[in-house]
Image (tube, grey):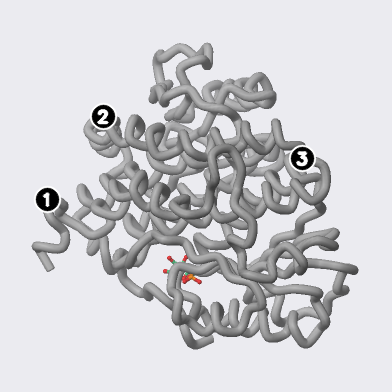
Amino acid sequence: DATERGEHRHYMSKEIFEQPQAIANTLQGRLADDRILPEIFGSQATAQLADIESVSIVACGTSFHAGLVARYWMEAIAGIPCQVEVASEYRYRRHVVPKEALFVTISQSGETADTLAALRQAKDAGYATTLAICNVPESSLVRESDLVFLTHAGPEIGVASTKAFTTQLVALFLLTIALGRLKRLDAAEESKLVALLRSVPAKLKEVLALDSSIARLAEDFVDKQHTLFLGRGEQYPIAMEGALKLKEISYIHAEAYPAGELKHGPLALIDEQMPVVAVAPNNALLEKLKSNLEEVRARGGQLYVFADFQVPLDEGEGVTVIRLPETNDLIDPFVFTVPLQLLAYHVAVLKGTDVDQPRNLAKSVTVE
Ligand code: G6P
């Protein structure tokens, strides 16, 4: 398997670096010049999506985080109400099926027991249409869904999901455009969104060039017991994904908070021993986030801020700023995911854990 890993020490690192290509592959054959092709979700998709009025997304783990990002896109871009839930909860509660609702499952493997059970239940409950976003063509989830979108990430070996996640985001961005077009997006807006998507692989290549500086940063985390991740808006799920990556492979306890909730509890945890990682794109919530970060600094917390070039933030005592390429808000989730993957990876390497097969975890959880 060393040959398959090429120059990389672990599959996870190979898969992180494959993301620009995996995203390009996932876009391949799905776009015309400046619009998305019809029927990329299945041959009956146009008819089946035409009357959709809301979206319910169910998934587990990293795939759930992709769904959480999609909720922001779906409501902000397409103007369609969207709810997102973990499959293990969804399957065991009674729910109201909204009228003309699309039920979306997201899964790398297509075999996660909870997600599959949730799909079966949603079908019985009378959802108008089901769509699977999946990386494995012959999986159960794909076979049992009305509509299918295959992410073309290629096989993912590392237990901690990386390229599957960013290609799921591509699928969800395309779905947002497809549904938005049926509602309120005009051709000019669609064209802008498509151009943004096309720019993602090149942006991620720029971010990957930060690998060695993030490896140095990782040294600060090795001795820590806990790490807090902060984000706001669609960066909150990205902070959640960053925390999940760190705990999965480095065994450091990590949790994510939407930065505005700091004062409602986690601020009590902050001291010199608590690194705080923040994702700070240059968006409407930046000023709010900055005041959240000042609250952390005032209590001695060590701040590591991933910020794009435009963000006016100074390094100083206890504040490290990692600059990312400037992007558009809408594709920030892609850009900010990658450095957090790299951070988790390098911390785990320094700690000497089994990066590709962390203890107690499985790549695909096919039993309950
Ligand atoms: C396991 C894996 C995770 C993955 C989750 C959902 O917990 O370790 O990496 O995100 O299952 O898997 P799925 O195949 O449904 O995306």
Would residue 231 be visible to someone looking at this image?
A: no
* Callout 3–callout 2 Cβ contact below 8 Å: no
Which quarter of the figure has residue 6?
bottom left
**Residue 264 placement (x, y as % from top left):** 71, 41
Q: CA distance from mark 3 to mark 2?
A: 40 Å
Q: Which residue is mark 2?
A: 213
Given residues 53 and 27, the one toward you in this image is 27
Q: CA distance from mark 3 to mark 1?
A: 44 Å
- The disc labelled 3 sits on which kind of residue? Leu
Q: Which residue is mark 3?
A: 185
Instruction: Tell me: residue 276, above or below residue 318.
Output: below
**Residue 353 placement (x, y as % from top left):** 23, 60
Given residues 45 and 315, the one toward you in this image is 45
Quadrant assignment for the N terminus: bottom left
Residue positioned 90% across, 68% down in the render: 99
Residue positioned 36% across, 48% down in the render: 19
User: In front: mark 3 or mark 1?
Assistant: 3
- The disc labelled 2 sits on which kind of residue? Ser
Using residue 254 as the reference point, say whether residue 330 is left or right of it.
right
Q: Which residue is mark 1?
A: 7
Task: Decide which of tag 2 and tag 1 comes sooner along the chain.
Answer: 1
Residue positioned 40% across, 13% down in the render: 316
Q: CA distance from mark 2 to mark 1?
A: 19 Å
Secondary-structure class at tag 2: helix
Q: Residues within 10 Å of mark 2 (few under 14, many from 20)?
A: few
Would residue 286 be visible to someone looking at this image?
A: yes
Given residues 200 and 118, the one toward you in this image is 200
Which quarter of the figure has residue 290?
top right
